[in-house]
Image (tube, rainbow, N blue to C red):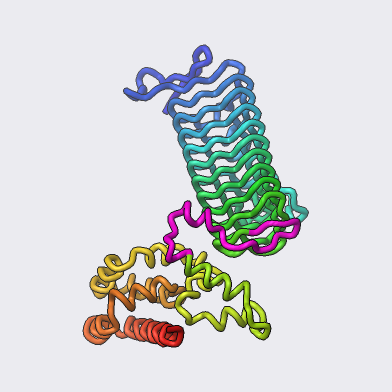
């Protein structure tokens, strides 16, 4: 939409004005390239810089002395505090979602500190919505065109943190002051690091985990665990974090049993962790944690589906006959990533008789073998529980 600059205020031309929408304000001391795309209601303070390829969504605020460079896109209602620098004049792109706060003197979306990076290569950074990135934090773009640095939604990144190239940070995480993530680190969802935490490159931090202050993490952190130490060791389950996130007492009890069985074996001949996982894979109380240690993070949607319990699963089993192509794909994933929750729900609320009826009378030949495999898994779980009791 055509705009003109008048006395420091960017206003829509009269013939093209949109009723009910506020004009953008640009201070006369700001430098805004004519090629930049500015949304409605944007406020740009003095001594700011907006590059030629920048795109600012509606109602963004740039406080004095903040800068946007390169091919950078800000979603609606983003705030750049004084001294913040977003983007770089490099090939590639920086994309930031809506309602993000970039704190004082943050540096976001610049070239990585990796010797693998070759000058002229494209590099990328993507940040979701509703993140608060506090003062003096640095977040770098990827090291290769085939990679991306990715941050999800609703994260709190406290002051002086560093998120290096090619990191994948999920959603709803809290990274306390001076948390340093080296290259290619993966942080799932609802993880919490205390202050001065250092994570070695390529490490994987599981969901709902907690890392104690001053820890150096040089190995993967399993889901639901609490670790700490100069070379971080397991300290038990993140009980307080699990309670805060709504885990039930029965779920926590199952996790505690699984933790003791896997990480605190009493049998000296139990072998390595692989052997202990194999030993408990079909024992119902342990499947919940086993699944999280192996594949659950790959199938977040299946985990959500499993938690819907009786009603949703029963409706699925009754309606799946009408959606055969979708059912085939979903059932393949369910079979591969079937969790303890799913086994319980099927066994208690959708009996084997119901499965047999659907399989024999209403399902296509492609879906029938999948249900047969699920029945075998249910039978194994039942037999294991009989052995336990």
Q: Is residue 364 visible?
A: no
The quarter of the image holding the N terminus is: top left
**Eyeballing the image, is 63 above or below 352?**
above
Q: What's the residue at 61%, 24% (across, down)? A: 48
Q: In screen coordinates, is 28 left or right of 249?
A: right
Q: Which residues are magenta?
A: 227-252
| Whole-percent x, y for residue 142 in the image | 65, 52
Q: Is residue 249 left or right of residue 138?
A: left
Q: Write down the quadrant of residue 217 in the picture.
A: bottom right
Q: Is residue 264 visible?
A: yes
Q: Is residue 73 magenta?
A: no
Instruction: Specify the quadrant of the image occupied by residue 247.
Output: bottom left
- The picture places residue 159, in percent across and down from the top left corner, at 65, 38
Q: Residue at x 46, y 23 (%)?
A: 24
Foreground of the two, 136 or 119: 136
- For the C terminus, give its image quadrant: bottom left
- Residue 307: % across, % down: 38, 64
Using the image, determine if residue 107 lies above or below residue 327. Answer: above
Q: Position of residue 6 (x, y in %)?
A: 49, 14
């Amino acid at each position: 939409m055509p705009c003109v600059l008048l006395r420091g205020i960017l206003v829509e031309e009269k013939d093209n004005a949109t009723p009910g929408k506020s004009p953008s304000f640009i201070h006369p001391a700001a430098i805004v390239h004519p090629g930049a795309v500015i949304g409605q209601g944007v406020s740009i303070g003095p001594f700011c810089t907006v590059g030629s390829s920048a795109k600012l969504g509606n109602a963004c605020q740039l406080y004095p002395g903040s800068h946007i460079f390169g091919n950078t896109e800000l979603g609606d209602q983003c705030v750049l505090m004084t001294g913040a620098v977003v983007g770089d004049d490099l090939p590639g792109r920086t994309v930031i979602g809506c309602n993000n706060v970039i704190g004082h003197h943050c540096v976001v979306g610049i070239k990585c500190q990796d010797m693998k990076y070759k000058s002229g290569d494209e590099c990328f950074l993507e940040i979701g919505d509703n993140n608060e990135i506090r003062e003096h934090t640095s977040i770098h773009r990827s090291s290769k065109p085939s990679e991306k640095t990715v941050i999800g939604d609703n994260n709190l990144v406290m002051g002086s943190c560093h998120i290096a190239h090619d990191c994948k940070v999920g959603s709803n995480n809290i990274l306390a002051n001076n948390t340093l993530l080296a290259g290619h680190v993966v942080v799932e969802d609802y993880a919490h690091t205390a202050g001065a935490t250092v994570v070695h490159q390529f490490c994987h931090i599981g969901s709902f985990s907690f890392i104690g202050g001053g820890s150096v993490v040089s190995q993967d952190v399993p889901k639901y665990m609490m670790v700490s130490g100069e070379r971080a060791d397991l300290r038990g389950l993140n009980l307080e974090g699990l309670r805060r996130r709504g885990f039930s007492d029965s779920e926590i009890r199952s996790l505690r049993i699984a933790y003791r069985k896997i990480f605190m074996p009493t049998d000296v001949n139990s072998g390595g962790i692989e052997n202990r996982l194999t030993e408990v894979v079909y024992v119902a109380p342990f499947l919940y944690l086993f699944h999280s240690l192996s594949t659950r993070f790959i199938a977040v949607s299946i985990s959500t589906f499993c938690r819907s319990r009786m009603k949703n699963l029963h409706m699925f089993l009754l309606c799946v006959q009408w959606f055969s192509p979708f059912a085939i794909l979903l059932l393949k994933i369910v079979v591969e990533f079937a969790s303890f929750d799913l086994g319980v729900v099927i066994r208690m609320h959708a009996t084997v008789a119901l499965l047999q009826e659907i399989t024999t009378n209403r399902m296509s030949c492609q879906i029938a073998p999948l249900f047969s495999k699920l029945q075998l898994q249910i039978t194994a779980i039942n037999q294991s529980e009989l052995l336990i009791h």
